[in-house]
Image (cartoon, grey):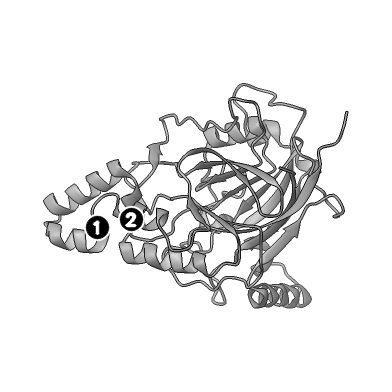
Amino acid sequence: MGFTKTTKTSFLILSDTHGKDHIMPKVPVDVAIHCGDLTDESKLDEFRSSLELLKSIDAPLKLVIAGNHDFSLDETAFGNLTAEATTKCHIEPELIKKEYGDFGQARELCSNSEDESITFLDEGIHSFRLQNGAALTVYASPFTPSRDAHQGFQFKHNDEHDFSISPSDNKRVDIAITHGPPKGVLDRTSSNQRGGCDQLFGAIAKARPRLHCFGHIHEGWGAKLVTWRGTEPTTTTPSHFTEIDNGASILIDSLADYKPRKFDSEQDAKDRKKRKERLFKDGFRSTSHCKDDKHPLVAGQQTLFVNAALEMGPEDEDPDAREQVPWIVELELPDA
């Protein structure tokens, strides 16, 4: 049996920029990925700011999905929220239109950007031939579970959502791009609860993409190289308890590595501060899992999970805290 030829491919991954003017690394990459929440209030000016941010990235392909804050891209949510604003809050329709436009206007901004490298993805499977000669198949979904499903692209926790990651032709998805995390991986909230989606975890455990990138849970920023148990899920309801081989998995980085700990020695505290200063000076965190690296990713047996939320958590009490940094990831992709 012959080996599939592969090409080293670089990705810049970010999420949850919320319309702010973040400084992007001046590092050329093959693909940039924005995992949603381009805006904070889904205003047209915020979309314009995020598009300017994307234009500043040196990449021939930039893939973008929506998040729950980007509700003006979701017809149902936009209709409900604007109706509520006019009837309950008595806001003039003209003022709403000035800030948010008509439905479809924000999507038109995203889809018809002057930067032709920007591609806005709806939920589903999309395939690309990259400039470096690699083939890339991605699954995209902006949907996240919520208690009240009041914002964009949300469903209630007790409802089901079909994350159809496996293509009908059985071709493997290389990358899953979702707004929210799967339950059990890089999804700890400030209240130490799991904020991820169990249905999404089940779909990822079955599809086993090379990379799953997301944001949404700001406090979950980090990366983890997960090794799966066996060749397929061990149960009809997969969870992080049953499917992940924690002994063979590697936590690459998390916010906890940069925060002071109660029992840190003086040297430990200094080392953490130096690591944090170096991280912000570089402006990104990088990890590579190609065939010549220390931890090469084995397709079908491992998945690299990346939470790339740039917005800080809601209860970050670190006085030295700053906006989080994007990730630069290198992986092998099959040749086109």
Residue located 48% across and 30% down the image: 162
**In front of the other: 269 or 10:** 10
Q: Is mark 1 on a helix, strand or loop?
A: loop
Above/below status of 266 relative to 121: below
Q: What element carries label 2?
A: helix
Across and down, in percent, residue 279 comes to: 67, 72
**In front of the other: 176 or 199:** 176
Asked if marks 2 and 1 touch (Cβ < 8 Å), the reply is: yes
Quadrant for the C terminus in the image: top right
**Amino acid type, residue under disc 1 in the picture:** Gly
Q: What label does residue 101 carry, if any?
A: 1
Across and down, in percent, residue 225 comes to: 73, 48
Residue 316 seen: no
**In front of the other: 254 or 2:** 2
Q: Residues within 10 Å of mark 1 (few under 14, many from 20)?
A: some
Across and down, in percent, residue 206 comes to: 64, 29
**Amino acid type, residue under disc 2 in the picture:** Ala
Across and down, in percent, residue 164 comes to: 53, 31
Q: Marks 2 and 1, how far apart in space?
A: 7 Å
Q: Name the residue under label 2.
A: 106
In this rendering, position of residue 164 left or right of residue 265: left
Residue 39 seen: yes
Residue located 63% across and 73% down the image: 26
In this rendering, position of residue 86 left or right of residue 290: left
Quadrant for the N terminus in the image: top right
Q: How crowded is mark 2: few (under 14 residues within 10 Å), some or many (20 or more)?
A: many
- The numbered mark, 2 or 1, whose residue comes first in the sequence reads 1
Residue located 61% across and 21% down the image: 236
- Marks counted in the figure total 2
